[in-house]
Amino acid sequence: MAILKILQYPDERLHRVAKKVAQVNETTRKLVRNMAETMYAAPGVGLAATQVDVHERIIVLDISETHDQLKVFINPEIIASSGVSDCEEGCLSVPGIYETVSRSGKVTVRALNEKGASFTLDAEGLLAVCIQHEMDHLIGKVFVEYLSQLKQTRIRAKLKKRLRETM
Ligand code: GNR
Ligand code: NI
């Protein structure tokens, strides 16, 4: 297994649109294992392939404290959503920035698992928020894009400064 490098905002590659996985195979499963290891090491509750510079529709999530509830979503689609939830979000690609984002409160997602089998999941609470956050990554969208232009400019300046200082 391997810990992958997580792209840091503002990196252009975070805005690429991921392609559907054509076939779930051993290569996919290896990537999923490495993404999970990277997420747990970070630590984070979710990771989209986009964040590790792989532009395929793959997400891993684990909102448990025990790190034993890994969920894998390949080619995820939200097939129903309802309600509203305002949640303070963070992102491994935008370290140290926490801002409230408004999203659907409940979502039903359909995806393939790591074996290539289709499943449907009803999610609410943090899980629903995270699914939406990760699916945004797959279309090249980072949570800060929901904030005002002023806040986005400030966040970009702060992260660029921090990048300069740590290089
Ligand atoms: O670790 C993460 N925590 C989190 C908290 C609130 C809302 C969304 C998230 S996702 C984030 C990991 C990450 O950046 N996934 O893309
Ligand atoms: Ni994120």
Image: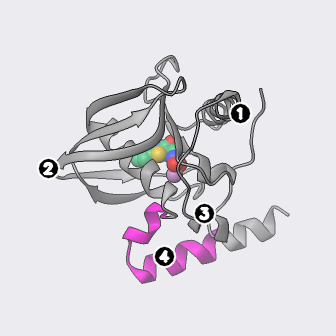
Distance from Cα at disc 2 to Cα at disc 3: 28 Å
Instruction: Answer whether labels 2 and 3 touch (C-beta < 8 Å).
Output: no
Amino acid type at mark 3:
Leu
Q: Residue under circle 2?
A: 83
Q: Residue under circle 1?
A: 27
Q: Is residue 54 above or below residue 27?
A: below
Q: Secondary structure at mark 3?
A: helix
Q: Secondary structure at mark 4?
A: helix
In percent of width and height, residue 31 lies at: 68, 35
Amino acid type at mark 2:
Gly
Q: Secondary structure at mark 2?
A: loop
Instruction: Answer whether labels 4 and 1 touch (C-beta < 8 Å).
Output: no
Distance from Cα at disc 4 to Cα at disc 3: 15 Å
Q: Secondary structure at mark 1?
A: helix
| Visible residue check, residue 61 | yes
Does residue 96 appear to the left or right of 13 in the view shown? Answer: left
Residue 149 part of the magenta-drawn span: yes
In percent of width and height, residue 142 lies at: 49, 62
Crowding at dot 3, Cα within 10 Å, few <14 / some 14-19 / many 20+, comes out as many
Q: Residue at x 46, y 20 (%)?
A: 69
Q: Which residues are magenta?
A: 141-159
Distance from Cα at disc 3 to Cα at disc 1: 22 Å
Image quadrant in which you'd find residue 114: top right
Which labelled disc corresponds to residue 152? 4
Our reading of the magenta stretch's main secondary structure is helix
Does residue 37 appear to the left or right of 108 in the view shown? Answer: right
Does residue 165 appear to the left or right of 104 in the view shown? Answer: right
Distance from Cα at disc 2 to Cα at disc 4: 26 Å
Amino acid type at mark 4:
Gln
| First-in-chain label (4 vs 1) | 1
Q: Residue under circle 3?
A: 14
Residue 125 part of the magenta-drawn span: no
